[in-house]
Image (tube, coloured by chain):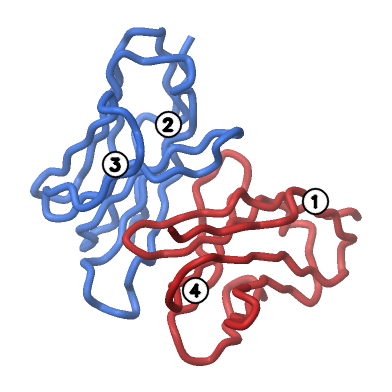
Amino acid sequence: AQSVTQPDIHITVSEGASLELRCNYSYGATPYLFWYVQSPGQGLQLLLKYFSGDTLVQGIKGFEAEFKRSQSSFNLRKPSVHWSDAAEYFCAVGVSDMRFGAGTRLTVKP
Amino acid sequence: KAGVTQTPRYLIKTRGQQVTLSCSPISGHRSVSWYQQTPGQGLQFLFEYFSETQRNKGNFPGRFSGRQFSNSRSEMNVSTLELGDSALYLCASSLPPGGRSSYNEQFFGPGTRLTVL
């Protein structure tokens, strides 16, 4: 069965520093992959998605993610973090239904 | 275009009661999915409706049910509430299946926070 693993429960970075959030998936074929962000008390907002083609995808708010089939990974990156990026980030695999990782909580230090 | 709306935003119930949550999808979206989010279990898929039919169902007891109306609005119902049902219930809508660019891309509402006492 498909599954998603986000190894890091909580990450703290300084404002202006680079960010990488890890995501590994388990699925037999090339999956549809997503990154969502959730601010406190809010629903989920789609940051970016990968269906096929170019393995480096650009999203909103300056985020990008790279699909690496050999590593079954879809890591999210941002070159310079802003204080407003503090939130919970979810990686997801879309097949017949959406399977989410446990989430990574991002704290941004001033 | 208005986003996904969910009502009510907050709800307090007692054990044994039942509750109905409502979701209005984005205009033109015909698929509606429901999720339960808790600190312990994370985001779990409840069910998906398309054209008033349940297309997919997660691993939840029969106390959890849903339906979809002809205008694509959806409701979910939880009967005989238990303390463990306290959660944020999220609704997501998406375009009809088949278009590759829109496959499974879901747009989420703000959720309904259910507290069971």
- Residue beneath label 1, please? A107
- Residue beneath label 2, please? B9
Which three-letter amino acid code belongs to the residue tagged 3? Cys
- Residue beneath label 3, please? B23
Q: Secondary structure at mark 3?
A: strand
Instruction: Sort mark 2 into few (<14), some (14-19) or many (20+) by Cα contacts within 10 Å.
Output: some
Question: Which quadrant holds the N terminus of chain A?
Answer: bottom left
Give the distance between the C-alpha atoms of the residues marked 4 and 3, in whole angstroms.
24 Å
Which quadrant of the structure image shows residue A95?
Answer: bottom left
Which chain does tag 4 point to?
Answer: A
Is residue A57 in view?
A: yes
Task: Confirm or deny contact between disc 2 and disc 4 (CB under 8 A).
Answer: no
Identify which residue is drawn at 89% across, 53% down. Answer: A109
Which three-letter amino acid code belongs to the residue tagged 1? Thr
Which chain does tag 1 point to?
Answer: A
Report which colour depicts chain A. red
In the image, A53 versus B71, the foreground residue is A53
Q: Position of residue B50 (x, y in %)?
A: 17, 55
Label 4 vs label 1, nearer the camera:
4
Q: Is residue A3 above or below residue B88?
A: below
Label 2 vs label 4, nearer the camera:
4
Q: Position of residue A64 (x, y in %)?
A: 64, 78
Q: Which chain is blue?
A: B
In the image, B37 versus B7, the foreground residue is B37
